[in-house]
Each structure stands twice: as structure tokens, then as C-alpha cells.
Image (spheres, grey):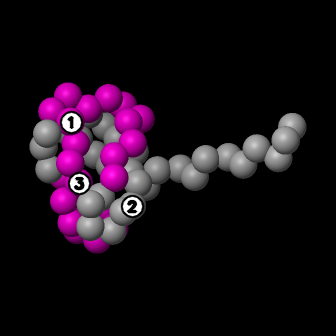
Amino acid sequence: MTLQECPECAGKVSVPEVPELSEIVECAECAGEFEVVSVSPVMLALAPEPDEDWGE
């Protein structure tokens, strides 16, 4: 695991040594969920909210 800076609170986010594009990781300090948007270098962005299923 490597540590990245949280885009929201500047805390530490654990990211796997070999992250996968679109992988979701969580900040232990603010509980924010972030998506891996680049793997070289590793870049995180706020994870998209899941679409609601209205029973369709």
C-alpha cells in the first residue's frame, strides 16, 4: 500500500501498490470516497455518487 493525500481533507488515503483505473478508495480521516483517475502518477478524484434505481 502507498499513501496519497486526500483531495478533501489533506489526510492520508491508502492506495494499493498497483492501483486499477476507476478503483474506489476511502480516506480514513474524513471517510470520503475517491476514484483512481490516473495510475501513473496516481491521481484521485471524488467518486461519483451511484445512480438511484427507482425500480425501473
Sort mark 3 into few (<14), some (14-19) or many (20+) by Cα contacts within 10 Å.
many
Quadrant location, the N terminus: top left
Residue 20 highlighted magenta (yes or no)? yes
7 up-or-down from 14: above or below = below
Q: Are marks 2 and 1 in contact (CB under 8 Å)?
A: no
Disc sitting over residue 13 in the figure: 3
- Looking at the image, residue 56 sits to the left or right of residue 44; the answer is right
- Looking at the image, residue 21 sits to the left or right of residue 18; the answer is right
What type is the residue that disc 1 sits on? Pro
In front here: 38 or 51? 51
Q: Secondary structure at mark 1?
A: loop
> Mark 3 to mark 2: distance in Å?
9 Å
Residue 22 highlighted magenta (yes or no)? yes
Residue at label 1? 16
Quadrant location, the C terminus: top right
Q: Secondary structure at mark 2?
A: loop
- Dividing the picture into quadrants, the one containing residue 23 is top left
> Residue at the location (76% across, 44% down)?
53
- Dividing the picture into quadrants, the one containing residue 37 is top left
What type is the residue that disc 2 sits on? Gly
Q: Position of residue 22 (x, y in %)?
A: 41, 35
> Residue at the location (27% across, 60% down)?
28
> Residue at the location (33% across, 68% down)?
30
Q: Position of residue 33 (x, y in %)?
A: 41, 54
The magenta-colored residue range is 4-26
Disc sitting over residue 32 in the figure: 2
- Looking at the image, residue 9 sits to the left or right of residue 46; the answer is left
Per the picture, the main secondary structure of the magenta-coloured stretch is: loop
In front here: 44 or 3? 3
